[in-house]
């Protein structure tokens, strides 16, 4: 997501008293100093955009040889406005180009062989979305006022001034693209930081910082005036200090930042150190490092794609094996179920046959038993039913029937003849004994023959066997 940052900025640049022309230059989102401009120059802008570039430089424009840091800033600004991706990488490329420009100017200075002193310096802000990067070479500096606290983001420029004040180096050594101070001739890129609404930046040359202490700079930036008025107050304060050389002050106020959370605090800014890009070889190797990074990323993507494809093949083969094993298992289960069904049907059929055979055997046994019983009954009948004539018994039986008694069935046996008698109402064993034996005392014979224990236990309708041989 692209965020738009609204800023107001003003630059004021004054030529030195003894200078035929102003050797300083500036850059405000595409606006720089024209060759015909002289004396004191003021330019202001107020705009909202996704990218901004603000810079102040000294001795970095050679009109005669067309060597100019402004050209590099124009190319960078055009590229950043069309596509602000890879922000840090593009800033590194800008640093390489600024370093190259400084080296070319230094080479030309050496080839001239003149006594002219030519100081070179550069300080710039690159804003993209809600991010900020600071570049610096030489004595030009960048300050940030946040929450009432002032901090110099580019301590290298101030270090040269401290060395001059301490007498370690001379003014002549500072002037020109001097290689006697190697650290001061290298482009420094400081760690990216996030913008906050209300941030105030000062980008200035060494003439201003040599005249004003940091406390004075912080006090003027903190008065709350707009960028235009603040820039003019800084130039006026430096002139009052007796500065005769070129003075340039560019004040940038961040009005609005369409972004999320901010993580930078004054303590974070206090501890900031320049990123480890302080030599020409390191700057020159940045592109190679990025190319190697892209190649490594491409190789990694190819390897990952190959692994994913191999995993897909393995999973697909495993799926086929699982389906085959599952199909075989299903076929075996179906075959087993058919076998179990056949076994069950055979067992049921065998059980039914066994039951049928058992029924037939039982029927055959019943028939045989019935035939055996019939044969036994027939044998007994032949033994017991032999013809005999007993006139007296027949007469008595007929007499009993004629007297209203129940019919009596006479049977023959090995012990003698037996007569069947059905007990009538009012009968007793003594009466029955009287009827058949003409003697009441022989009722015991009837009891013994019929297994009667109690003479009073006979009932009406009971059939008694009366032995007639007594």
Image (cartoon, rainbow, N blue to C red):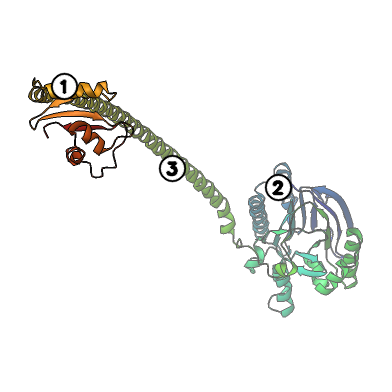
Numbered disc total: 3
Percent x, y of residue 243: 85, 70
Q: Is residue 237 left or right of residue 29?
A: right
**214 lies above or below 339:** below
Cα distance in 3D space between marks 3 and 2:
41 Å
Cα distance in 3D space between marks 3 and 1:
126 Å
Tell me where residue 318 sits by quadrant. top left
Sequence-wise first label, 3 or 1: 3
Residue topped by disc 3: 307
In the image, 451 versus 133, the foreground residue is 451
Kindly check if marks 2 and 1 are in contact, taking CB atoms under 8 A apart as contact. Answer: no
Q: Name the outermost residue toward the front.
A: 438
Q: Secondary structure at mark 1?
A: helix
Point out the frontmost of discs 3 and 2. 3
Sequence-wise first label, 2 or 1: 2
Q: Is residue 111 left or right of residue 385?
A: right
Q: Secondary structure at mark 3?
A: helix
Q: Secondary structure at mark 2?
A: helix
In the image, 127 versus 413, the foreground residue is 413
Percent x, y of residue 454: 26, 44
Q: Which mark is residue 394?
A: 1
**133 lies above or below 1:** below
The quarter of the image holding the C terminus is top left
Residue topped by disc 2: 76
Tell me where residue 204 sits by quadrant. bottom right
Sequence-wise first label, 3 or 2: 2
Point out the frontmost of discs 2 and 1. 1
Percent x, y of residue 68: 72, 51
């Amino acid at each position: 997501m692209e965020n738009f940052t609204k800023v107001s900025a003003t630059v004021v640049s004054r030529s030195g008293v003894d200078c035929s022309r102003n050797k300083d230059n500036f850059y405000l989102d595409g606006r720089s100093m024209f060759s015909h401009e002289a004396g004191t120059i003021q330019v202001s802008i107020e705009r909202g955009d996704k990218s901004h570039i603000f810079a102040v430089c000294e001795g970095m424009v050679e009109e005669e040889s067309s060597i100019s840091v402004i050209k590099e800033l124009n190319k960078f600004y055009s590229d950043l406005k069309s596509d602000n991706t890879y922000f840090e990488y593009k800033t590194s490329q800008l640093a390489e180009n600024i370093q190259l420009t400084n080296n070319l100017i230094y080479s030309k200075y050496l080839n001239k062989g003149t006594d002219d002193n030519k100081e070179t310096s550069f300080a710039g802000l690159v804003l993209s979305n809600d991010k900020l990067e600071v570049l610096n070479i030489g004595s030009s500096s960048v300050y940030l006022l946040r929450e009432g606290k002032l901090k110099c983001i580019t301590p290298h420029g101030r270090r040269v001034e401290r060395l001059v004040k301490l007498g370690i180096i001379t003014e002549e050594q500072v002037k020109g693209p001097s290689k006697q101070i190697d650290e001061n001739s290298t482009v420094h890129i400081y760690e990216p930081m996030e913008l906050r609404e209300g941030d105030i930046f000062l980008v200035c040359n060494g003439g201003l910082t040599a005249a004003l202490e940091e406390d004075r700079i912080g006090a003027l930036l903190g008065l709350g005036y707009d960028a235009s008025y603040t820039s003019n107050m800084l130039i006026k304060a430096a002139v009052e200090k007796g500065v005769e050389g070129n003075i340039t002050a560019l004040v940038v106020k961040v009005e609005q930042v369409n972004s999320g959370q901010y993580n930078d605090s004054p303590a974070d800014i206090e501890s900031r150190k320049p990123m480890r890009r302080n030599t020409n070889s390191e700057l020159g190797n940045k592109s190679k490092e990025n190319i190697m990074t892209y190649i490594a990323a491409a190789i990694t993507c190819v390897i990952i794609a190959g692994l994913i494809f191999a995993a897909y093949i393995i999973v697909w083969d495993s799926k086929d094996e699982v389906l085959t094993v599952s199909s075989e298992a299903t076929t075996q289960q179906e075959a087993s179920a058919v076998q179990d069904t056949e076994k069950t049907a055979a067992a049921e059929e065998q059980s039914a046959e066994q039951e049928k055979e058992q029924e037939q055997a039982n029927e055959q046994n019943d028939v045989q038993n019935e035939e055996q019983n019939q044969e036994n009954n027939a044998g007994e009948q032949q033994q017991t039913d032999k013809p005999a004539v007993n006139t007296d018994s027949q007469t008595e039986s007929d007499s009993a029937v004629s007297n209203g008694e129940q019919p009596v069935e006479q049977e023959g046996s090995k012990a003698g003849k037996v007569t069947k008698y059905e007990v009538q109402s009012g009968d007793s064993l003594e009466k029955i004994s009287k009827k058949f034996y003409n003697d009441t005392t022989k009722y015991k014979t009837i009891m013994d023959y019929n297994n009667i224990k109690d003479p009073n236990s006979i009932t009406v309708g009971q059939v008694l066997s009366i032995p007639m041989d007594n």
